[in-house]
Amino acid sequence: MDTQYLMKPRAAGKAFGASHRWKVLGVGVAANAGFSAVAAGIPTTAVWMRTGYHLDNAQLGLVLGATGLGIALSELPWGVATDKLGDRPVLVAGLAGTALALLTMALWLAPSVASIPPLWLLVLAMACVGLLGGSVNGSSGRAIMSWFKEGERGVAMSIRQTAVPLGGGIGASLLPWLASTHGFAAVFSALALMCAAPAVFALRWLHEPPHGAAASAAKHGDVPRRSPLSDVQIWRVALGIGVLCVPQFAILTFATVFLHDFGRLGLAGISTAMASIQVGAMVMRVWSGRYTDRHGNRRAYMRGSTLVAAASFGVLAALVASGHAVPVAALVATIVLAGICVSAWHGVAYAELATLAGPARAGTALGMANTIVYVGLFVVPFMLPHLLAASSWAVVWLAAGLVALVVHPLFPQPVR
């Protein structure tokens, strides 16, 4: 691949007007949806993966956790590389590398009657997929921040964040069917295609904004004076984003178990509840981005979101503590509400973080936050069962609410 073609930022940027920013946003959505189908979709094939690769539950957890660990380790380096090299080469290289890694797994690491790949090689491959796919978040976020001006960034970043549940939903709908009927060669091939397609889109449409847009950004104070790595305020926001994802991961990973074991809900009811959380999160992310752009109140919204999320988990814990006499409909409605409340703030918080860093250093700042986020994704599924075994579901949801409450002072106070 011609690296000089990848890294022609300004010359290409001059040919595009302000309306081109919607194509850039589309590339960001496609890239995040494609990789989200990998990160969130592969775990939905867990039953077939356990059987096909002859794994026990502990080995299965290691395989599924390897991708999250790879993402956590690579987010910050990819973010720094984005700020140095530009979003286009990093996003294209990361997506193409992820597609190549998945295609390699389809050709040589799919289980068959004749051979079962060794555990260590499967874990290594999954970790490599995470390491390469970690490029998506920071590079796509920096591109959007560069093209959209203040007053538009909240809704733009919120639309980008809807790609996460969108990609997860596509993966959850498609991959279990592929795994059960066609095997894991088909699973990995389909995911490779989902990552390769946005790489082509990025190669075609992802360019640096024209000189006028860059000058406007500098005029409005978007160019930072120091690295985000040495900025305490950026670290606080990044830490707040990562910690506030912990109760969200508790919902996404164990709400199905809770609804089945405690609520005695069937497959249809569980599927409806989880789909409602994802759809509600997508709608609220877009609404919150538009709302904060119109009112200029991102910081107030972020701090308020922590209180609303904490309150919703408190209500859920109280319902659970009252016993099994609680109507199932009330239980489902409350956990859906909690799941939406703890997911609605993403785009707004990422927009504020990137604005604090400035477009020129947004990749590093987003990498800082996503490193903490994916550490949480790696830790929560391992820690929550131990807390549940030592206490109860009421304590689990109360603890999730307390975690959300702890984030409140981390987010900056509104500027008068």
Image (tube, grey):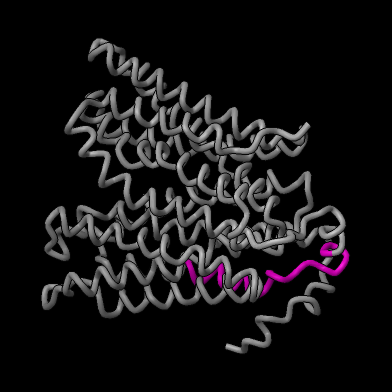
Question: Quadrant of the image for the C terminus?
Answer: top right
Residue 124 in the image: above or below residue 303: below
Where, by quadrant of the figure, is residue 8 drawn? bottom right
Q: 349 or 407: nearer the eye? A: 407
Please tell me which residue lies in front, 308 or 228. Answer: 228
- Name the residue at 75% across, 46% down: 152
Res 288 visible = yes
Tell me the magenta residue range.
Answer: 195-214
Residue 197 is inside the magenta segment? yes
The part of the image, by quadrant, that contains residue 411 is top right
Q: Residue at x 27, y 67 (%)?
A: 184
User: Considering depth in this image, is 261 or 139 the residue closer to the camera?
Assistant: 139
Q: Is residue 398 left or right of residue 291?
A: left
Question: Is 397 placed above or below 355 here?
Answer: above
Q: Position of residue 9 (x, y in %)?
A: 74, 76
Looking at the image, residue 318 lies above or below residue 251: above
Q: Position of residue 136 (x, y in %)?
A: 53, 64
Q: Is residue 142 visible?
A: no
Instruction: Give the residue at x 38% y 65%.
Output: 70
Relative image position of residue 304 (x, y in whole percent):
59, 28
For the N terminus, give its image quadrant.
Answer: bottom right
Magenta-drawn stretch contains 355: no
What residue is rendered at 29% in x and 36% in y? 256
Q: How many marks?
A: 0
Q: Quadrant of residue 313?
A: top left
